[in-house]
Each structure stands twice: as structure tokens, then as C-alpha cells.
């Protein structure tokens, strides 16, 4: 079992729809959770971080964390073609981060 | 504020040759990471430095890979000898003290023939 698992995708949604990206992790004591966006041929960049159970909203992005279920998700509302990228989930414990393999999202105009 | 700098951006070598990558983190960032990202996979941590000390190098293939961070600022990652399976993007990232958010450099794309 991988430490951080993401839906392999690809995920395709129409422009304006909600995109839902999921991530599960195996280390129950993980403390910090991150979503990074990686455009093709580029390096990852941080979108959201979340540290406590519940929802955290930032513009069109909402991160959701459920530590009991060891599950973290990212919702993208009003998806735009510019959101087309690979989304990486990263889970951190005591300063050590582990990345999932990412979910590739395509937003079709 | 300048971002994380890496060089070279691209490198093509033949197997059994050696190669070195350089990284300069964001000024003042104490933590520096080297990742290997194979196409279609997520970044895999090779080594993590806190200032000039190694925090984690459990996934570094020490028979061929080495890294150093002299003076706690810039860092070099070396592969000697390279294998075909080392073809990947090598990402350097840094974090401020006490934070876990990572800021990535542009990466070095390595092709081993």
C-alpha cells in the first residue's frame, strides 16, 4: 500500500463544473496536508494547506480534511481550462513530506 | 523575492557517466529538499537538509548518489555512475524555518542514454 494514494485519473470536467480530487494516506499521525498544482513540464506550486479537520476555502478552492478517515480532498468550483494540470497531494509528519502520484485534471471549454 | 534557482535545466549523459546538479534556495530558507520525479509519478524525496545537516536521506541510493549543502545555503546533488533508470526530473525545494510549505525550483531534466 502506498503511503499517499490519489485517484490516477485522468479526470475530465466541463468548464464551470466542480472538480473533486481525492487523497487517502496511511500514516495516522500525519499532521499537515498540502495540495500542489503542477502544470505539464513545470514544477509543483502550492495551492492549499490544511491542518485541522473540516473545510478550508480559498477562492474557488476548498480543501477538506477528515483525519479519522485519513482522507483529504480538493474541490475546484467553476473550473476553468487554466485549471488543467496534475494535482499532487502531500502529507507531512514532523517535517517529512510524502507526495502522491497526482491526479491529472482536464477542464474542457 | 527570488525563487529557488537550479542549474542546469537540462542534461543528457550516457550511462556510467557522472553528473552534478546545483540548487540555491530562497534566501533565509533553512530547509532544503532534493526530489526525483519520474514521468507520471509524484516527487520522491531523496534527501532533506536542515541548514547544513542531513535530516533524512533514507531514500537516497548512496552507492551512486551523494549530496552536500556546505555553509547551509546552496547544495549540489551528484550521480556517479548514472544508470538508465536515473532519467527523471530532479527538483530542489526549500522551506522557511518552522514551516512545511515547500517552494520548488524549475527542476533539472536528466536523460541518461
Image (cartoon, rainbow, N blue to C red):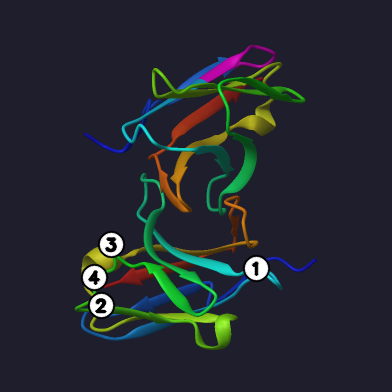
Q: Which label sits on residue B61?
A: 4
Q: Between tags 3 and 2, which lies in front?
A: 3
Q: Residues within 10 Å of mark 2 (few under 14, many from 20)?
A: many
Tell me the chain of label 4: B
Q: CA distance from mark 2 to mark 4?
A: 11 Å
Q: CA distance from mark 1 to mark 3?
A: 23 Å
Q: Residues within 10 Å of mark 4 (few under 14, many from 20)?
A: few
Q: Which label sits on residue B19?
A: none
**Quadrant of residue A4 within the rendered picture:** top left
Is residue A79 something that shows in the picture? yes
Q: Residue tagged by mark 2?
A: B82
Q: Is residue A72 left or right of residue B47?
A: right
Mark found first going from the N terminus, 1 or 4? 1
Q: In this rendering, do the residues under marks 1 and 3 share a single chain?
A: yes
Q: CA distance from mark 1 to mark 4?
A: 25 Å
Q: Residues within 10 Å of mark 1 (few under 14, many from 20)?
A: many
Q: Between tags 1 and 4, which lies in front?
A: 1
Amino acid at each position: 500500500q502506498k503511503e499517499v494514494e490519489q485517484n490516477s485519473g485522468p479526470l475530465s470536467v466541463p468548464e464551470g463544473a466542480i472538480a473533486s480530487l481525492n487523497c487517502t494516506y496511511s500514516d495516522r499521525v500525519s499532521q499537515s496536508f498540502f495540495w500542489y498544482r503542477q502544470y505539464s513540464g513545470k514544477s509543483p506550486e502550492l495551492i492549499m494547506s490544511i491542518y485541522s479537520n473540516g473545510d478550508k476555502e480559498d477562492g474557488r478552492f476548498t480543501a477538506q480534511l477528515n483525519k479519522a478517515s485519513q482522507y483529504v480532498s480538493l474541490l475546484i468550483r467553476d473550473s476553468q481550462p487554466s485549471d488543467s494540470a496534475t494535482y499532487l497531494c502531500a502529507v507531512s509528519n514532523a517535517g517529512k513530506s510524502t507526495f502522491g502520484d497526482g491526479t491529472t485534471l482536464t477542464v474542457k471549454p | 523575492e527570488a525563487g529557488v534557482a537550479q542549474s542546469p535545466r537540462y542534461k543528457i549523459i550516457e550511462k556510467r557517466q557522472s553528473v552534478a546538479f546545483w540548487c540555491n534556495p530562497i534566501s533565509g530558507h533553512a530547509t532544503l529538499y532534493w526530489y526525483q520525479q519520474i514521468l507520471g509519478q509524484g516527487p520522491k524525496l531523496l534527501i532533506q537538509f536542515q541548514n547544513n545537516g542531513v535530516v533524512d536521506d533514507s531514500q537516497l541510493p548512496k552507492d551512486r548518489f551523494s549530496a552536500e549543502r556546505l555553509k547551509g545555503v546552496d547544495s549540489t546533488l551528484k550521480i556517479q555512475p548514472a544508470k538508465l533508470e536515473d532519467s527523471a526530473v530532479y527538483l530542489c525545494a526549500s522551506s522557511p524555518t518552522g514551516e512545511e510549505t515547500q517552494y520548488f525550483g524549475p527542476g533539472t531534466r536528466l536523460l541518461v542514454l
